[in-house]
């Protein structure tokens, strides 16, 4: 969305406008696309774990830590591609960029079925990671461009909860496709081929359904576009722009806030390797066969979905992200502690071990809460895209390093890896506390700047109020209040309020 387009909408002299957009937010079509694609992205990437219980390692000759390296190569590609990805997100319209990425990762996923060696698997997984690199940053930026800050946690939860749905779908598909007799394809090959083809077919649908921004949305009237823009005024996160301001990048690099986001992205994504890559193998080590393991992962996906939605709903109701995030990590610590403390070869422990494993699903509440926390505390087009790319670096680095904590020699209990993961989640809670202190310091700095600029020390953060309407009317500010729609960073806009 160009700045001049925003400013022309912001210049409306109408002081009141009836809105229906609080009840039916303008980005519902975009959100439907993100829901579908998150499901496909997680399915294409995560199906490696379910395929592993159908002799993937044996059929492709993987030995030692090669399976861990196959899992880690996708995030290596994401790390390498992130700088270019941040630039692409600003320069290329979402309607072009998104379907291009979808087509690329769909082809890579389907091509996995043709692999018969470590080299082949590494190659296709590299391209899978490359095409998925911009997915999460772009989804998060789109959420910030279409929704108010108070709405963002719930909106992120809707599409991010597809992690759980994808886990259930992958487990059910593995169970069903694993029973199909075939002389040409092994069960794991059938699984990769099916999920890859589904993604390829969805690429043109994404192009058909997706819009670039509110001002060009085909499904909104001109009046609805104006309302949609006005809803976002209180966010003070700036307008989207196709101009890449390098001063924003420098600001990101110099802020402690940015690097705390990276660390907080790194830790839970290292921990998720325990469930995504090695989870089925750990459950199989409890004494179950491949088909039982597939079925037992379906409840895990259900817990994921419930936890993601519940955590974001709690964040929405309490207007808090940090406390909710820290609270939802406590069951994770308890579950990992049980996995480490209980004997895996004792059949009487199967029930408690499964409970412990399902408690680990609470870790998936971390990313959606962090994503909405990051985008709600960042303003400026280039700064937001750079921050999200940096966040994705942390995510990718975690996904890269996490599997390397586990080796074939640790099978079937993987206790050394589990012990390391326990420490990561304890450290995450500490980092959340540090970021809260940092954001409180930044708010005090802005308060002092407002006083020195002749403004009130305190400003009302209307972006965190539940209702956009005031007495049934939308208060539309006049043109001299267009600052929220300029491409200002959060540090340069003294009226920006950091949220905890």
Image: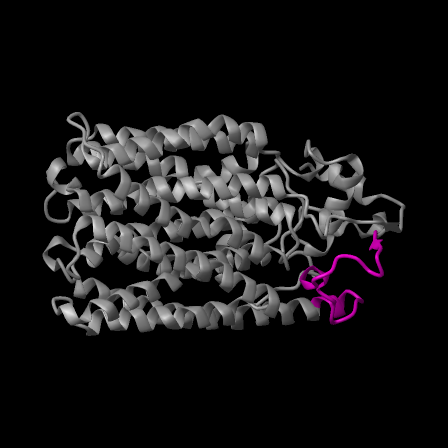
- In the picture provided, is 272 more to the left or to the right than 405? right
Above or below residue 375? Residue 428 is below
- In the picture provided, is 288 more to the left or to the right than 49? left
- In the picture provided, is 280 more to the left or to the right than 93? left
| Residue under the image location 68 percent in, 57 percent down | 493
What is the quadrant of residue 91 in the picture? top right
Residue 75 makes an appearance in the image: no
| Residue under the image location 16 percent in, 44 percent down | 66
Give coordinates of residue 294: x percent, y percent. Answer: 26, 50
Magenta residues, start to end: 449-476
| Residue under the image location 71 percent in, 39 percent down | 3
Say whether residue 220 is magenta.
no
Above or below residue 485? Residue 111 is above
Depth check, front residue: 21 or 80 = 21
The quarter of the rendered structure image containing the C terminus is: bottom right
| Residue under the image location 12 percent in, 70 percent down | 346
Above or below residue 232? Residue 259 is below
Give coordinates of residue 32: x percent, y percent. Answer: 55, 41
- In the picture provided, is 245 more to the left or to the right than 187? right
Give coordinates of residue 162: x percent, y percent. Answer: 45, 48
The quarter of the rendered structure image containing the N terminus is: top right
Give coordinates of residue 393: x percent, y percent. Answer: 40, 49
Say whether residue 462 is magenta.
yes
């Amino acid at each position: 969305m160009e700045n001049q387009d925003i400013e022309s909408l912001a210049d409306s002299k109408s002081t009141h406008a009836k809105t229906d957009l609080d009840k039916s937010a303008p980005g519902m079509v975009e959100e439907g696309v993100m829901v579908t694609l998150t499901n496909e992205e997680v399915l294409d990437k995560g199906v490696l774990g379910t395929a592993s219980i159908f002799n993937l390692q044996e059929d492709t000759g993987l030995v030692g830590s090669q399976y861990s390296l196959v899992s880690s190569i996708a995030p290596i590609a994401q790390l390498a591609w992130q700088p270019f990805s941040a630039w692409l997100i600003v320069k290329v319209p979402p309607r072009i960029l998104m379907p291009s990425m979808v087509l690329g990762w769909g082809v890579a996923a389907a091509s996995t079925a043709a692999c018969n060696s470590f080299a082949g698997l590494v190659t296709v997984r590299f391209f899978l990671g490359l095409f998925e690199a911009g997915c999460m940053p772009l989804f998060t930026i789109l959420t910030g461009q279409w929704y108010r800050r108070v709405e963002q946690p719930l909106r992120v939860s809707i599409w991010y909860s597809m992690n759980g749905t994808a886990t259930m779908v992958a487990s059910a598909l593995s169970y069903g496709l694993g029973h199909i007799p075939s002389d040409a394809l092994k069960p794991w090959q059938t699984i990769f081929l099916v999920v890859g083809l589904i993604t390829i077919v969805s690429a043109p649908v994404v192009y058909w359904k997706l819009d670039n921004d509110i001002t060009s949305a085909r499904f909104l009237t001109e009046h609805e576009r104006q309302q949609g823009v006005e809803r976002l005024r209180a966010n003070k996160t700036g307008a989207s722009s196709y101009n890449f301001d390098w001063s924003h990048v420098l600001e990101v690099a110099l802020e402690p806030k940015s690097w705390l986001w990276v660390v907080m992205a790194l830790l839970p994504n290292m921990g998720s390797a325990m469930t995504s890559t090695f989870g089925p193998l750990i459950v199989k080590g409890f004494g179950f066969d491949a088909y039982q393991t597939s079925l037992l992962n379906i409840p895990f996906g259900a817990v994921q979905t419930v936890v993601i939605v519940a955590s974001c709903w709690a964040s929405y109701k309490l207007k808090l992200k940090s406390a909710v995030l820290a609270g939802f990590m406590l069951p994770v610590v308890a579950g990992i502690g049980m996995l480490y403390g209980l004997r895996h070869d004792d059949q009487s422990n199967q029930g408690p071990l499964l409970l412990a494993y399902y408690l680990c699903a609470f870790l998936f509440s971390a990313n959606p809460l962090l994503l909405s926390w990051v985008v709600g505390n960042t303003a400026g087009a280039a700064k937001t895209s750079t921050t999200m790319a940096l966040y994705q670096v942390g995510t990718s680095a975690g996904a890269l390093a996490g599997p390397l904590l586990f080796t074939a020699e640790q099978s079937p209990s993987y206790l050394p890896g589990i012990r390391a993961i326990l420490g990561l989640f304890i450290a995450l809670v500490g980092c959340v506390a540090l970021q809260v202190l940092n954001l409180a310091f930044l708010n005090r700095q802005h308060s002092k700047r407002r006083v020195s600029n002749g403004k009130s020390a305190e400003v009302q953060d209307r972006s965190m109020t539940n209702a956009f309407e005031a007495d049934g009317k939308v208060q539309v500010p006049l043109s001299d209040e267009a600052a929220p729609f300029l491409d200002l960073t959060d540090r340069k806009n003294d009226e920006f309020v950091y949220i905890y």
